[in-house]
Image (tube, grey):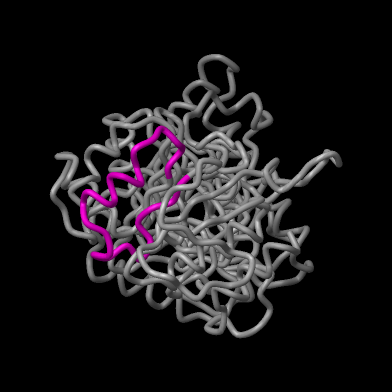
Amino acid sequence: MQKIFDETESLDRRCYHEFELSEDILMEHAADGMREYIAAHFNTGHSVLIVCGSGNNGADGIALARILHGTYAVSVYLPYGVKSPMAQLQLRRAEKVGVSVCKTLSAADIVIDALFGTGFSRSFDAPTASLLQRLNALSAVKISCDVPSGLHRDGSLESAVFHADITLCMGALKRSMFSDAAKDVVGSVHVIDLGVSRAVYETPSNWNLLEADDIKLPHRHRHNTHKGSFGHLGIICGEKQGAAMIAGRAAFRFGAGLVTLLSNENVQLPDELMQSHLLPSTTTALAVGMGLGNEFSDCELQAHLNHTLPLILDADIFAHPLFPSLLQRRNIILTPHPKEFTTVLKKCGIADIDIATLQRDRFSYVEQFCRHYPHAVLLLKGANVIIGYGTYFYINPLGSNCLAKGGSGDVLSGLIGSLLAQGYAPLDAAIHASLAHTLAARTFSQNSYALTPQTLIESIATL
């Protein structure tokens, strides 16, 4: 797990004031860190075009050019000249060692974007948009210095944005890199140290990036057990029965000792799943919402919810009249996709927005919800999953476009419900089920369009 920061300017200032590390020293370490990455991944002699802005992001790029010069065929392109004192200083240094400043864009093996850093906030003019489009069209490995140009601090994108294969992030991870919109432009992200280790540079943060090795699977360590030792998940089976069946199969595959679907009708189920018209007395967690539809009257549904069991809430339950009362309960997990989350925000009186507005500022709306309902765990689905609980937030960046299929969310609900039933705390259930969900999708080796919920469930066994 790694820390994530909304901004790192305050971390830089801390280096200046507490560690007596000047801006110049930090910049030299930034440039040398980029050089180290390039040297480790690209043979000497490659041609490198560094496109630099007029400010300090451009200064980082010019410093890198100076360090690479003589080992790589380096050229610098300065479409806006140099304006900041550091950019002017770095250009003087680079020119003294013989770095070539070119007048036009040229082909290269590696193109480095050092145009605009984290301070970028304005809209691009037509020449800048055209420049980025031309850079993206070059046949080269594309690397961004700190953040891709065109990525805003809130994670939204300009109409034109640099599409990086690799982003070399200075000092610490920026939250903007993990918006849904950023997923297609940041490439693989690597942090560059700035003269001190990240353990020293970073301060406490309430935002964290989940990694594959953070997962805690429900392995069975005790031998003297029985099926009741591993929980009993109840799933309310509504109008679209397939959703509950998918969730049930996923829960059973992920270790739940028993899984019962609660239905008004007799449903043809897989052999391992049970069904009942009443909530079994041994139930240890309940999932409601997936495929719910209008199968149950409010009174019938209320009867199934007349307990204090841990709940996972998904899909149709967010628009149901009972939803506001369920939000007052403890031990609940909400798993909306963006459209459903706009319904949640409206029902809660937090915001009345459309999906596009939500997606432009996902982080802020998750924080707002968690301030209003600090006892609830929120898992907002997306290209990058956000999990919030109180004042703590986690991003799972391991999602795959393979999961953009009907039924994938039902698998996730089943995985979370399984862990809840087995005794995981709600936050832990959301984190580890989300990791299992995304990692299982990553094991899929066939065409990206071909993943099915059944294949995804089977992959859970191989984690």
Q: Quadrant of residue 104?
A: bottom left
Judge whether residue 96 is colored magenta: no
Task: Say whether residue 209 is visible.
Answer: no
Name the image quarter holding the C terminus: bottom right
Is residue 225 or residue 161 the one in the foreground? 225
Q: Quadrant of residue 251?
A: bottom right
- Which x, y percent locates residue 367? 33, 36
Classify 113 as above or below 86.
below
- Which x, y percent locates residue 269? 53, 72
- Which x, y percent locates residue 98? 63, 58
Classify 132 as above or below 308.
below
Task: Say whether residue 180 is visible.
Answer: yes
Classify 7 as above or below 54.
above
Is residue 89 or residue 315 the one in the foreground? 315
The residue shown at (27%, 70%) is 127
Judge whether residue 300 is colored magenta: yes
For this orientation, the residue located farthest to the top is 18
Residue 68 placement, left or right of 239: right
For this orientation, the residue located farthest to the right is 223
Name the image quarter holding the N terminus: top right
- Which x, y percent locates residue 453? 54, 73
The residue shown at (63%, 71%) is 271
Is residue 237 or residue 372 the one in the foreground? 237
The residue shown at (45%, 75%) is 405
Residue 289 placement, left or right of 445: left
Is residue 175 or residue 21 the one in the foreground? 175
Residue 67 placement, left or right of 13: right
Count of number-bearing discs: 0
The residue shown at (50%, 76%) is 268
Q: Which residues are magenta?
A: 286-311
